[in-house]
Amino acid sequence: MAMSMRRVLLASTGVVAFIAGWWLLSLRYDAEQLPGPGAVAEALREMAANGKLWRNSGISLLRFAGGYALAVMLALPLGLLLGWSRRSLVAADPLIQLLRPISPIAWFPLAVLWFGIGNAPAIFIITLAAFFPVLLATVSAVRSVPVSYLRIAANLGASRLLTARAVVLPAAFPTIVVGLRIALGTAWIHLVAGEMLGAQSGLGFLIVDSRNFLRTDLIIAGMLVIGILGLVLDRLIGMGERRLRAAWGQA
Amino acid sequence: MSAIVLSGVTRIYPRPDGSRRAVLSGIDLAIGEGEFLCLLGPSGCGKSTLLHLLAGFDRPDAGSITIDALEVSRPDPRRQVIPQDYGLFPWRSALGNVLFALEARGVRGALAAERAHAALALVGLSASAQQHPHQLSGGQRQRVALARALVVEPEVLLMDEPFGALDAFTRYRLQDEVRRIAEDRRMTVVFVTHDIDEAVYLGDRVVMMSADSGRIIRDLAIRLPRPCDRTGSAYLAIRREVFAAFALVHDGQDSPRAGGRADQVRRAGEP
């Protein structure tokens, strides 16, 4: 008990020091430039009371879920194929390496031209952002499936379909999950960027909109909410990852 | 059913420096149906390579391997390999691992469950059917691997140093069980080991390979009453003979003049 208290204290050190530094700095500036922690807490209360907090968080999370799910549905089967067939990887790899360094943000003008303003361009950006981490993790996971598993399957005369479904996919899954987690973080970062540029709602829009009204306290409150939701999402998938590892017999 | 004939089997691997090394060179060997043959040699002598060739995981660069006059060209469920690391799927229970073998053979449903449970019972693992590999001891994992191989009723069992990682008592018990099961099912067994005791105890025949030549240096029939007594004088005499053969080979590597002596052993060992 004493140990866990000390752990909690130690873990809060960074946050407490940050808030203290922020507060000290805020004393020297106008509230329009840098509001203090108290003012931002007040802004959060205001957003919670008038419903802006819940509405925009909900919209952002929905877009995020849609884009992320779409990315996984596209990248996972493609990654399995490219990891499984050496020829297809040789054929596709240069294209992947060409497209991957282009930031999802750079796609934004095109996304707005193609899909207009609203949910679609934000979802498009999230899908792009999550696609490559999932794809690359899946390819490398499939390629590193132990050859002894494949030999066992071949020795028993397992069909290619059974080998893919019952050997390669489960053997690769723990590694794929690492990619899913990285993709989650990347996609969340780009969600906000997407909403800042082309949406009329969501947490990204909330920040831009608050800037237009010079409500710096609301800007920082919005940023905090983005950070907290990102943390919660990461912890959730981390918990899933640990459960999965336990079921797979890994520490 | 399953007589295995190797003639002139050669397998060449490239070395890191670009040169080529014959891991196996001109191996001639005939394995009779129902024979329990131990392939004995130090690490790197090519015995595992030979097993992979027998399994069809790999092809020889020269020579041929036939089973009942049919060329071995790919893996076949009738020849089951038990790999050194067991090759169990960690995401499946013991039962699930055995069921995979049946699924691969197209056996499903109640019949598959019945056969899988029977195979686990045969290796004494009924109580651990629902355990996952990481919850099992090394000996139990080996038993699961054995059950998975046996459930498809192979004619040939190819075992690659299967008991190397086990403690002595578990190893002795598993040796007895493998021997019993192989006799009951009249399987042909090729058992790769670097343990002289194990080879002499298990094999009807011990084929010895030297460390570097990629050749068979001695082929010894073991005629001991089964189950054999690990402390009996007949057993100890054969063990001494095998030991002597290997001591000569190893001396031969160390001293330049001893090459002739290893040669003599090979000549003496030819049938």
Image: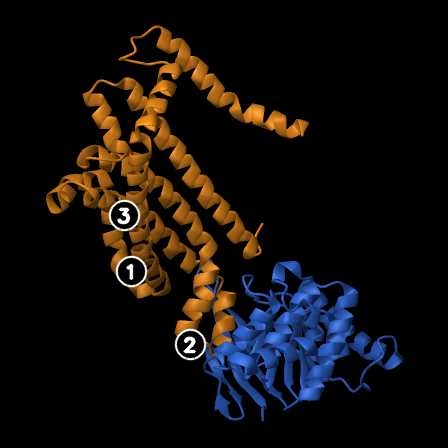
Chain colours: A orange, B blue
Tell me: B61 left or right of A250: left
Q: Quarter holding the N terminus of chain B?
A: bottom right
Q: Position of residue A164 (x, y in %)?
A: 41, 68
Q: Mark 2 lies on which chain?
A: A
Q: Where is residue A178 in the image (x, y as percent from the top left)?
A: 44, 48
Contact? badges 1 and 3 (CB < 8 Å): no
Q: Which badge, 2 or 3, comes first in the chain's sequence?
A: 3
Identify the residue shown where x is 50% and y is 80%. B108
Q: Is mark 2 on a helix, strand or loop?
A: loop
Q: Mark 2 or mark 3: which is in front?
A: 3
- What's the distance in space between the residues labelled 2 and 3, CA to CA? 33 Å
Q: Which chain carries label 3?
A: A
Q: Mark 2 points at which residue?
A: A159
Q: Where is residue A86 in the image (x, y as percent from the top left)?
A: 34, 64
Q: Mark 1 or mark 3: which is in front?
A: 3
Identify the residue shown where x is 35% and y is 15%. A39
Are the residues under marks 2 and 3 on the same chain? yes
Q: Mark 3 points at which residue?
A: A127
Identify the residue shown where x is 55% and y is 56%. A247
Q: Mark 1 lies on which chain?
A: A
Tell me: A16 left or right of A251: left
Question: Residue type at mark 1?
Answer: Val
Give above or below for B164 relative to A196: below
Identify the residue shown where x is 52% and y is 82%. B77
Nearer-the-camera pick, A140 or B202: A140
Q: Name the residue under label 1.
A: A90
Question: Residue type at mark 3?
Answer: Thr
Q: Quarter holding the C terminus of chain B?
A: bottom right
Q: Which badge, 2 or 1, comes first in the chain's sequence?
A: 1
- What's the distance in space between the residues labelled 2 and 1, CA to CA? 24 Å
Contact? badges 2 and 1 (CB < 8 Å): no
Nearer-the-camera pick, A32 or B88: A32
